[in-house]
Every structure is written in C-alpha cells, then in structure tokens.
Image: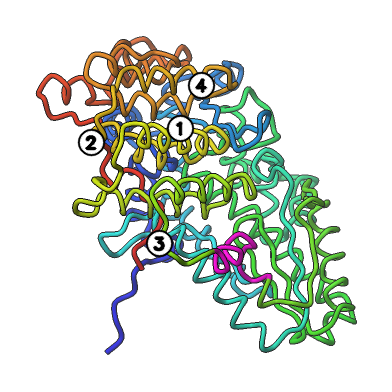
C-alpha cells in the first residue's frame, strides 16, 4: 500500500486553502523567528479591516505608492562583510490584500491554468511552495525538496546524460520587473501583452488583467518602483515562480523554434529550483545551445546569468551534490571531542560560507549536546567558553545561521556553569562591529534572561518584540485612516508575558531552529 503523500503543491489546492496557507504567520515571514513571535494577530486584524474588499475602499491607491517605508526591512548578512540580504515584513494590510486578489476563485483558476501550461514545458520545476500534509512544517518540506527533487534526481539522470551545466540568476528577486507578471500570465507572453496594449480596448484590458493587479500592488509596496519584489515571505516566493514560469514557457517555445534543439528534444533535460538551473545533456554541443538560449531568454525578461555560479562538467555524479557535502563524506568519520567538532564546523563555514550544510551540522551538534548526559563530557568552564567562542564565530561569519548557533550557545550557557550576562555581553560586543545585524539582534535577544531580553533594543524589531512599542509601528501606516492605524497596534510577541509568568526559558528548543525535514 502506497504511503500518503507528505505534501501537496500549492497550485493543487483550492483557492480558499491557498488563502489560508499564505495567511499563516510562518508563511507571512518565511525566515526563522523565535517561538514567541507570531503575526497571526496582526494578519487577522488586517483581514477584518479589508473584509475581503479591494484596497481602494480604504485609501487612495494612486497616492499609496508614494509613501516610503511602507514595509519593514530587516537586514540579514548573507556571509562576507559587505554581503546582505534584504528581508521585508510586508505591511500586513497590503499583504492580505494581495493574497485576497490572487486567491479570488476566478483569479486562482487563472493561476492554476498558467501552472498547468508551464508543466508542459521542457523545464522541470522543483520549487513550487509546498503544503505539508504531516506534522513537519511547510518550511521543512520545502528545504527537503531540494535534496529529493534536485540532487537525487540529478544523480538518477547521470545514467542518461554525460554533461551538466549549472547557473543561476544574478540578484533574482531584486531584478524582477513588476510588469512581467502581465507578460507571464497573459497567454500570449510578452508579444501578446504588447499587442493587447496597442488595441482599442487598452483600458478594459488593463482592468481585467490579473498581472496588472499584481503589478500595481507590488509597486504600491515599493514607492512606485517597477524593479524588484520583497523577499522574506512564501507569497513572494510563489509570485517569483509565476515570472520564472513565464521564462520557462518562453524558453520552451524558443527552443522549439531552433531546428537543432527541436530535433534532439530527448537529448537534454532542464531542472529548475527557483532561480537555479541545471541542464543535463548527452553532449557538449546541445548543452551549450540550451545555455545560450536560456541566456537570451533571461535577458528578454530583464535577468542576467550569474557568471560566478555558471559552470559545466562531464562528471555529473560528483557535481550533482554540492561540493561541501562531498567533502564532508571524506572527512574523518571518527568520534571527535565537542571542541574539535565545533572547530570542524568552523572550518567548514570558512571554506563554504553560507552553505546549508553549516545549518545541518549546527543542528546535529545541538542534538548531540541534548542527548542524555552528553554535555557532561565538557569537563571545564574554559572548554565550554572555548566552544561558545568557536560557535559564535561560525555565526559571525555566517549570520544567516544565527538561529542554529543561538540554540547551541543558549544550551551551553544554561548548563555549562557559564556566567550568562557576561558571556552574552561579550557576544553582543563581538557583533557590534558588524553592519546590518537586525536578524542577529532578534536571536541574541532570544538567549537573554528576563529583564535583559525585555530591555534589549538594538533594532526597531527587537523593541517591538520586547513590548516597548506597538507592532503597528513597524510599518508606515500613515496612508490608512487613523481608526485603522490604531487597530493595527496588535502584539506580535508574547515575550514579556512569558517572562512575567515564568514560562520563558533562554534555552532554545529544537523546533525553533529546525530547517530540515526528518525524512
């Protein structure tokens, strides 16, 4: 008997199911936050404000786009001193409005029809958002799908193909042209849209176009700019799939017009995970042809290939899995001391900054520490402080994994006879010289004791989390009537309540920092 499917693609659920999925707190902010942070309250208030009405019923939508800082920006260091990723908490009213628009039954059917047409292309897409059907989180299933649908599938296809080409899009989300939603969703693609714009019913066409509605709302979030979409939510990941799906369809039709490629349709395969492409081919000629065609099509949509991440190989087995994973196989399998294992993770982070394997190793380290009596093997305060220092430097060089590092640090401080305040102060001072550490601040606040956590205010969001100011202050709501602005002052954090009731524990539970599915 076949076991139940662990997940369902978002495009295969009903409009109402999609709406509820996208309105979940963990999908509104798809990056990791402490357990006491939830946006469910402010999202529900936003739903009540809108009452499934159009945003135009609340304000002058033409003037909305000229308000700055409508969304709240969190700067997260990607790795490297001057490499940052801009995460955005979209204004909840604007977020709910956009969700309402795309999940209107008629619009959702149009989106489903679009993705069904995309399935007919030569491009296998492995990155449609997933709805978990198990106790695993949606995020965990999404992360695991990379291994199953990309790495494992590539290994399986190495029997059929001899060459593999890899590339991705340079600054994908910030390069998405908001007008391209219309290009993608219109059945005629870019040329069909151009023709429609020149027809007599231009005004009527714009009013009926779902792509136009999405475009307009994204511009309202971004000071009327047409370049880039916010990062940090499952909704935007899904919208990016619409544009990239449009690219897939244009790539497919362009390749069919090429006699060489059309005549050798079974001699290559394309796998795409978000903006990462893998092209497998029987020979170098076909691989180069596909790569050249992909480059041309991406240019048409305002994208550029990332030359720094573009490569080719005739060793598919070795290249199917990321290099750091292969290197790990050959590392000494012997049991190491806690300090040596921490140093091993540090060396990995130095060699492969921002690698997902770092997070996995940190979680494994956390699990070992939490095994019965294992932490007692750390026999001295000096050794414990040394391990804390090493793990801190892993996070310092790879801030995107601060949550996993904080889990380890919190455990060691709580059970390693370490003076908490002094140690945390030293960690804060270490990060103080690093620019744009909003995301780090959230997790440093998480491992502090009681009043220290409440009084930690290195960033605006940490103040909101502590309860020092209302959550509504995160966003610029001045475009809304005053009565609605007041209604948005809903707590997004229970930190103070947890501390007051003695329920708060600086030690972090695994489910807070878990990235990967157990499968």
Who comes first in sequence, dot 4 or dot 1?
1
Quick one: which residue is furthest to the left in this view? Answer: 501
Label pair 4/3, CB-CB below 8 angstroms: no
Task: Assign the C terminus to one quadrant of the image.
Answer: bottom left
Residue denoted by label 1: 389
What span is colored magenta in the figure? 319-331
Q: Is residue 329 magenta?
A: yes
User: Is label 4 or label 2 in front?
Assistant: 2
* Horizontal relation, residue 316 to residue 429: left or right: right
Q: CA distance from mark 3 to mark 1?
A: 21 Å
N-term mark: 2 or 3: 3
Q: Does the residue at mark 4 contact the one at mark 1 (Cβ under 8 Å)?
A: no
Q: Residue at x 81, y 58 (%)?
A: 297
Q: Nearer the viewer, residue 487 or 240?
A: 240
Picture layout, residue 86 above or below residue 60: below
Distance CA(mark 4)–CA(mark 1): 10 Å
Mark in front: 2 vs 3:
3
In contact (CB < 8 Å): disc 1 and disc 2: no
Position of residue 202 in the picture relative to residue 483 (left or right)? right
User: How far apart are the alpha carbons under marks 1 and 2?
Assistant: 16 Å
**Residue that label 2 marks:** 415
Question: Does label 3 or label 1 sit earlier along the sequence?
Answer: 3
Label 4 – label 3 distance at C-alpha: 31 Å
Q: Which residue is mark 4?
A: 430
In the image, taking residue 304 as reference, residue 435 lies left or right, namely left
């Amino acid at each position: 008997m076949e076991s139940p499917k662990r997940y369902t693609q978002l495009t295969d659920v009903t409009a109402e199911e999609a709406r509820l999925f996208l309105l979940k707190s963990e999908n509104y902010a798809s990056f990791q936050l402490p357990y006491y942070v939830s946006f469910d309250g402010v999202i529900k208030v936003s739903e009540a404000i809108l009452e499934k009405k159009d945003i135009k019923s609340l304000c002058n939508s033409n003037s909305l786009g000229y308000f700055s800082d409508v969304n709240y920006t969190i700067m997260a260091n990607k790795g490297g001193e001057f490499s940052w990723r801009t995460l955005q908490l979209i204004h909840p009213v604007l977020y709910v409005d956009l969700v309402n628009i795309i999940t209107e039954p008629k619009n959702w059917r149009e989106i489903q029809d679009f993705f069904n047409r995309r399935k007919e292309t030569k491009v296998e897409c492995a990155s449609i958002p997933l709805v978990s059907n198990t106790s695993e989180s949606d995020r965990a299933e999404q992360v695991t799908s990379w291994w199953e649908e990309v790495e494992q599938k590539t290994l399986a296809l190495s029997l059929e193909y001899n060459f593999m080409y890899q590339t991705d899009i340079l600054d994908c989300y910030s390069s998405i042209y908001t007008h391209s939603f219309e290009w993608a969703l219109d059945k005629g693609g870019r040329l069909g849209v151009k023709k429609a714009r020149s027809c007599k019913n231009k005004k009527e066409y714009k009013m009926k176009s779902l792509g136009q509605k999405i475009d307009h709302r994204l511009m309202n979030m971004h000071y009327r700019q047409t370049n880039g979409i916010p990062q940090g939510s499952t909704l935007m990941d899904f919208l990016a799939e619409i544009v990239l799906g449009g690219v897939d369809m244009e790539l497919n039709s362009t390749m069919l017009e090429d006699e060489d490629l059309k005549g050798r349709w079974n001699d290559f395969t394309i796998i795409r995970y978000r903006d990462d492409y893998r092209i497998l081919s029987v020979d170098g000629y076909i691989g180069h042809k596909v790569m050249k065609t992909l480059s041309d099509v991406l240019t048409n949509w305002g994208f550029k290939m990332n030359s720094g991440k573009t490569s080719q190989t005739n060793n598919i087995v070795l290249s199917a899995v990321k290099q750091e994973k292969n290197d790990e196989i050959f590392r000494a399998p012997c049991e190491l001391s806690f300090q040596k294992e921490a140093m091993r993770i540090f060396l990995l982070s130095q060699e492969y900054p921002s690698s997902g394997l770092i997070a996995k190793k940190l979680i494994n380290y956390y699990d070992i520490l939490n095994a019965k009596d294992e932490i007692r093997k750390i026999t001295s305060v000096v050794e414990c402080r040394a391990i804390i220092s090493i793990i801190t430097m892993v996070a310092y060089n790879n801030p995107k994994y601060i949550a996993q590092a904080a889990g380890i640090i919190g455990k060691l401080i709580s059970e390693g006879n370490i003076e908490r305040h002094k140690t945390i102060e030293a960690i804060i001072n270490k990060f103080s010289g690093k620019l744009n550490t909003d995301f780090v601040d959230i997790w440093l606040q998480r491992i502090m004791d009681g009043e220290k956590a409440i009084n930690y205010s290195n960033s605006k969001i940490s103040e909101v989390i502590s309860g020092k100011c209302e959550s509504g202050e995160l966003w610029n709501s001045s475009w809304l009537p005053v009565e609605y602005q007041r209604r948005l002052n809903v707590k997004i954090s229970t930190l103070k309540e947890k501390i007051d009731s003695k329920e708060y524990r600086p030690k972090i539970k695994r489910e807070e920092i878990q990235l990967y599915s157990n499968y």
